């Protein structure tokens, strides 16, 4: 039973290319399934979350992160009476546009693409699902519903100011109403992303021995989680103790988002999904007190994990790879695979060529990018 403000499957705005609807699946179930079967989704298995893919089998990748985000998003959406299938589709697709080497690769490509319109991973995700996935006979892309595309484009909020070209090009054909907030389902996917990475990055940082359990136990919110575990399970094994505490931290964040969203939705009393989009403010968010304390954890992770000396050193090494590959393919496009050279032959001007090269490099996995760097430069 969906709440009135949930996105209703029978009221979808449809797809850019009309299709006969399935007898067995809702439009958003079909979107989810197409995302899961997409080549870009499979490549997330070998793309960086924080640690470069080859640094260890235990650490999260973009694929495992996306699965964890979808799990959180389903839980929150179900509790709020939202459309779970749409929420899951947006959650699974939200990181499709990330290049190899995570934010390090994104920073490098943004710098290299400055003369050609820049780079934005959210906009690149739209480009992937509307153009670069080329498997269907009748269209390029996955031909997802308007609601799923809106969620991918706007899950972090309205898109204003200079719109990234990859998003602007599609939006000119299929207006996603970028100036409004997204559906409550997409907002849930965005908060699920925050919950997932704030939780699992603590797990991975401990595994990498970048900080200690005792240091975590002193952080706001986490201090109470550790205290509760010590009260219930005195003398618990070291590894079980930290896992139990982090599990409670995870659950606490999920519950806070649900309670806060319920309060905001009750106050606004939206009658339909359009009321959510036009509310002028997000309906799904952390409470003020939890958000303020969570910033301490985010700062801790930034300095102790994302900018840890070993991580910074690896950032330098993989940046060299991207910095070398991009100008090489620009100068010698015949080095691109055969299927990409056809697009190059049709390209008009340096900007179009740069965007083709960007699409190719951004689609690489960590492993393949390093293999290409070694093959072409002997590095």
Image: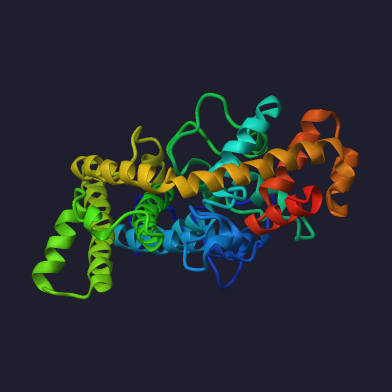
Q: Is residue 124 above or below residue 233?
A: above
Q: Position of residue 176 (x, y in %)?
A: 56, 39
Q: Is residue 200 left or right of residue 375?
A: left
**Depth check: 280 or 357 in front?**
357
Q: Tell me what residue is drawn at x 37 percent, y 59 percent.
A: 209
Q: Tell me what residue is drawn at x 66 percent, y 44 percent.
A: 127
**Depth check: 367 or 286 in front?**
367
Q: Tell me what residue is drawn at x 43 percent, y 58 percent.
A: 69
Q: Is residue 118 above or below residue 276?
A: above
* Colouring convention used in this rendered image of the protein: rainbow
Q: Quadrant of the N terminus?
A: bottom left
The mark total stands at 0
Q: Is residue 57 left or right of residue 300?
A: right
Q: Is residue 237 above or below residue 35?
A: below
Q: Is residue 83 visible?
A: yes
Image quarter of residue 173: top right
**Depth check: 228 or 28 in front?**
228
Q: Position of residue 334 (x, y in %)?
A: 90, 45
Q: Position of residue 12 (x, y in %)?
A: 53, 52
Q: Is residue 141 visible?
A: no
Q: Position of residue 337 (x, y in %)?
A: 84, 53
């Amino acid at each position: 039973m969906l709440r009135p403000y949930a996105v209703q499957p029978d009221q979808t705005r449809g797809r850019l290319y009309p299709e006969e609807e399935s007898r067995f699946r809702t439009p958003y179930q079909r979107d989810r399934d197409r995302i899961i079967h997409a080549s870009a989704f499979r490549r997330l298995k070998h793309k960086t979350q924080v640690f470069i893919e080859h640094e260890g089998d235990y650490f999260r990748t973009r694929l495992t992160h996306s699965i964890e985000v979808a799990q959180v998003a389903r839980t929150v959406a179900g509790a709020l009476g939202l459309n779970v299938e749409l929420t899951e589709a947006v959650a699974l697709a939200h990181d499709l546009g990330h290049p190899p080497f995570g934010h390090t690769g994104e920073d490098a490509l943004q710098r290299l693409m400055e003369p050609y319109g820049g780079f934005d991973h959210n906009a690149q995700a739209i480009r992937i699902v509307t153009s670069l996935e080329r498997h269907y006979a009748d269209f390029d892309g996955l031909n997802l519903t308007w609601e799923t595309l809106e969620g991918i484009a706007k899950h972090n909020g309205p898109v204003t100011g200079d719109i990234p070209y990859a998003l602007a090009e599609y939006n000119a054909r299929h207006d996603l109403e970028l100036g409004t907030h997204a559906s409550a389902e997409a907002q849930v996917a965005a908060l699920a992303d925050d919950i997932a990475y704030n939780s699992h990055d603590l797990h991975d940082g401990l595994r990498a021995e970048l900080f200690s359990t005792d240091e975590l136990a002193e952080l706001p919110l986490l201090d109470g989680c550790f205290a509760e575990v010590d009260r219930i399970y005195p003398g618990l094994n070291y590894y079980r103790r930290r896992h139990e505490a982090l599990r409670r931290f995870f659950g606490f964040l999920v519950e806070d988002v649900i309670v806060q969203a319920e309060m905001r939705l009750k106050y606004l009393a939206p009658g339909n999904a359009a009321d959510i989009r036009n509310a002028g403010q997000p309906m799904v968010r952390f409470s003020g007190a939890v958000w303020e304390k969570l910033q301490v954890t985010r700062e801790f992770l930034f300095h102790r994990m994302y900018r840890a000396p070993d991580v910074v050193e690896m950032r330098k090494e993989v940046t060299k790879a991207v910095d070398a590959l991009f100008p090489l393919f620009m100068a010698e496009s015949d080095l691109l695979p055969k299927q990409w050279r056809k697009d190059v032959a049709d390209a008009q001007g340096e900007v179009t060529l740069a965007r083709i090269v960007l699409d190719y490099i951004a689609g690489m996995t960590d492993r393949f990018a390093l293999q290409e760097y070694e093959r072409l430069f002997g590095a």
